[in-house]
Image: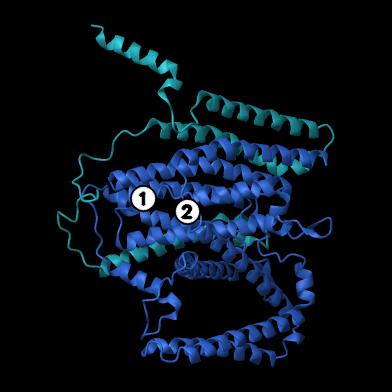
Chain colours: A blue, B cyan
Amino acid sequence: MPIVLESLAKIVFMFLLIMGMVPALIWAERKGAAFIQDRTGPNRAAIGGVRLAGLVHPIADVLKLVFKEDVQPEARHKAFYNLAPWLAMTIAVSSYAVIPFGDFITIAGRKIPLVVADLQVGALYVLAVASLGTYAVVMAGWASNNKFTFLGGIRATAQMISYEISMGLALMGLMMIFSSLRITDIVAGQGDMIFGFLPKWGVVVQPLGFILFITAVFAETNRNPFDLPEGESEIVAGFHLEYSSLKFALFFMAEYCHMVVGAALIASFYFGGYQIPWAPRAVLEANAGGLLTAKLIGVAVAASVFALLFLRRAQKEKNKFNDNRDREPVLGAGLWILVAIGAAGALLLKPWTVGPQGAEMVATVFQISAFVAKVVFFAWLFIWVRWTLPRFRYDQLMHLGWKVMLPLGVANLVVTALVMAFV
Amino acid sequence: MTAMPFLGTATSALTGHYATVLIFVLVGFVFAGLALGVAKLIRPSNPSPAKMTTYECGELPIGSSWIRFNVRFYLIALFFIVFDVEVIFLYPWAVMFRTLYPIAGLGAIVFWEMIIFLGILTLGLAYVWAKGDLDWVKKLTERPENGAATAALEEEASAP
């Protein structure tokens, strides 16, 4: 059953991607916050005295939360209280099923599209799952039987349903232009050019729709400036106040999963997904050998530069701490030297002579890298915004959702229809 | 392989099928469940009455929090239902617009029909906006009927 195997392989790949992205984002959030607030950030957790720039912290967090006692309030509604974090995590990962992370790949003569489930109504599925997220939050808030969590829960519901309509309206302009609800069609359509030089990305053809969509996505993920369901300064921690140990960890991970989904959706709908501008697949395949060689040389050069920087720091800070921490720059330099040697060694295999099979593989890898790069950028945007903007007041939130975004969404739709009809 | 009509066409096969989504969601569900189960097995459990109180910044909570809450949240929910259902009708139109518009005699109908539909949607929005139901902060003086209603209630209560 190769079909089943290939589907399973894609599901496993997607889960590995999520489970890799989440700790990486937690690290990026902490380091990013520290960078924005001009401080050092996480630097205490260490393996054998080596701190790895704070990368150990997410691992330490997981271990701590797994071994913590689960403190539960007596007054809770038992079933819903236990179900809420479970549901939150499940819903957070389910959106990934329809996001295409690459075009296709040919293995043993079979063309495999690089998306777990290529639903005809993929965009609707995304919207449906986004609205399901409300249930987990309100369930957690209500079942804890705590005034703070209850407030957080109903706030979250009102906020999420208010921005959902604008999200749907913003996407509708895109559906009109690409005449499809299938996300792979929308991404493939963005490979075209307008006037021969402008990539037909969603952000180019739907600038207002993009602004509405990105705002709605921020509201749906409950991140700053829309983090009123959590609102530390008002309702302590909002809907997950009464959760501890791994149940809290699931809510925490669900938030980061939502961030990755949001970033992936913005990238897929408005920034061409896996498409590289001005370099469609045919061009990539035709120049695969040259591209691969250039990439390997680039990696080797960049890694050498990083290694040199680390070596210089190692020399400068030779006896800074007088313990294992002094080894960190040397280790970093060693790592980059290994990468540089790897890339240079790969050049010996004559990458400029790849065959047609290899050329396709190279094109696929380049496209997947483009997608991941876009997702990483938008995930960083989430972090950047969180540590830059203050939180909305609740009436401002409702004002923006109903009196600004909804009319603008309708106007965007009408203008799109007019332009398509008369231009 | 035997024919499986429910799987769709050759290239999409399982990829285009909802079963894949179901499997994906189930994998997520089982993953979260496994994590919860493992944590339950290895974590300590020493509940005490003090630990199990509801957290209210150190105060003992008074009463349950399952109470009636502000009616404004219900209003938002009502608007959501109304507008979301209307928006659902727009999806098929949005997808088919490019195909149907160039057809002679049909294009104008397709275009104006939806403009009228959107007009009604906007009219509904304008109505709740003018009624002041979209305002989160309300002044009692803005609603003169409020006083009348209270007076009527008082009258009713005082009647035998």
Mark 2, Cα crowd under 10 Å, few <14 / some 14-19 / many 20+, is many
- Is residue B1 visible to us here? no
Tell me residue A201's x, y (percent). 71, 56
Question: What residue would you read off at disc 1?
Answer: A233
> Seen in the image, is A273 located left or right of residue B64?
right
Q: Residue furthest top?
A: B160
Residue at figure coordinates x 53%, y 26% from the top left:
B128
Q: Is residue A298 above or below residue B114?
A: below
Residue at figure coordinates x 42%, y 89% from the top left:
A326
Q: Is residue A100 above or below residue B108?
A: below
Q: Chain of mark 1?
A: A
**The residue under label 2 is which amino acid type?**
Arg
Quarter that holds the C terminus of chain A: top right
Residue at figure coordinates x 61%, y 56% from the top left:
A266
Q: Is residue B102 above or below residue A314?
A: above
Mark 1, Cα crowd under 10 Å, few <14 / some 14-19 / many 20+, is few
Question: What residue would you read off at disc 2?
Answer: A223
> Seen in the image, is A304 located left or right of residue B80?
right
Q: Are marks 1 and 2 on the same chain?
A: yes
SS at mark 1?
helix
Q: Earlier in the sequence, mark 1 or mark 2?
A: 2
> Seen in the image, is A315 located left or right of residue B54?
right
Q: Is residue B149 above or below residue A298?
A: above
**The residue under label 1 is which amino acid type?**
Ser
SS at mark 2?
loop
Tell me residue B71's x, y (percent). 39, 30
